[in-house]
């Protein structure tokens, strides 16, 4: 699957966002090495801090189905610049995706920023840090 197709998957995921509070819809599409696409949207809650971002929804779906290896993740929102993932998602993506995994950030205007997971969060806290 190419980059444009994965961005289309993220846009389709975005349509299902549950965002009664912010009204800010975000979509993500994670391309597994199994060739499957795991879609995610943001899901809010009246207890606001329980909100799950689109990126983490997609990752948790994939892991919960046994897929832990990915080629790329695309993220889309209606932002002026390609949507920047929040700090929590950068941390989770850093642990659950290999450093060379492609990250494709985009918006509804067609602006695209491509980087790697390693570039998304330099100095991320990692599992190795837990071992004395
Ligand atoms: O990269 C991002 C940034 C924000 N959000 C969600 C969280 C919340 O529902 C709304 C506003 O912050 O957007 C995401 O899903 N992903
Ligand atoms: Zn986030």
Image (cartoon, rainbow, N blue to C red):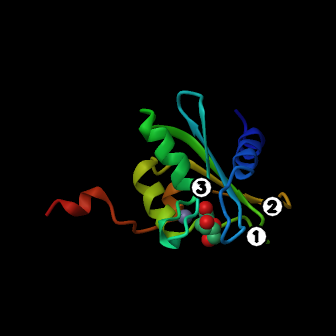
Separation (CA) of disc 1 from disc 2: 7 Å
Pointer 1 or 2: first along the chain: 1
Separation (CA) of disc 2 from disc 3: 19 Å
Q: What crowding class fits label 1: few (fewer than 14 Cα within 10 Å), some (14-19), or many (20 or more)?
A: some
Q: Are marks 1 and 2 in contact (CB under 8 Å)?
A: yes
The spot of residue 113 in percent (x, y) is 71, 60
Question: In front of the other: label 1 or label 3?
Answer: 3
- Note whether ligand 1 is within 8 Å of mark 3: yes
Q: Quadrant of the C terminus?
A: bottom left
> What residue is shown with label 2?
111
Residue 48 vertical position relative to residue 131 in the rendered view, above or below: below
Q: Quadrant of ligand 1?
A: bottom right
> What residue is shown with label 1?
81
The spot of residue 124 in percent (x, y) is 39, 66
Separation (CA) of disc 1 from disc 3: 17 Å
Q: Which mark is residue 54?
A: 3
Residue at x 76% of width, y 38% of height: 5
The spot of residue 128 in percent (x, y) is 25, 57
Pointer 1 or 3: first along the chain: 3
Residue at x 82% of width, y 59% of height: 108
Residue 69 seen by the camera? yes
Q: Which mark is residue 13?
A: none
Q: Quadrant of the N terminus?
A: top right
Q: Are marks 1 and 3 in contact (CB under 8 Å)?
A: no
The spot of residue 47 in percent (x, y) is 50, 71
Left-right relation of 14 to 122: right
Q: Tell me the quarter of the picture where residue 64 sits.
A: top left
Q: What crowding class fits label 2: few (fewer than 14 Cα within 10 Å), some (14-19), or many (20 or more)?
A: some
Residue 84 vertical position relative to residue 30 in the rendered view, above or below: below
Mark 3, secondary structure of its residue:
helix
Left-right relation of 81 to 116: right
């Amino acid at each position: 699957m190419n980059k444009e197709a994965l961005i289309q998957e993220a846009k389709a995921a975005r349509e299902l966002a549950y965002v009664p509070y912010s009204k800010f819809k975000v979509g993500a599409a994670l391309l597994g090495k199994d060739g499957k696409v795991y879609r995610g949207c943001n899901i809010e809650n009246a207890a606001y801090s329980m909100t799950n971002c689109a990126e983490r929804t997609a990752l948790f779906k994939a892991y919960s189905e046994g897929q832990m290896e990915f080629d790329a993740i695309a993220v889309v929102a209606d932002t002026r610049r390609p949507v920047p993932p929040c700090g929590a998602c950068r941390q989770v993506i850093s642990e659950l995706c290999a450093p060379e995994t492609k990250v494709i950030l985009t918006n509804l205007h067609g602006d695209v920023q491509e980087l790697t997971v390693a570039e998304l969060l330099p100095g991320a806290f990692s599992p190795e840090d837990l071992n004395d």
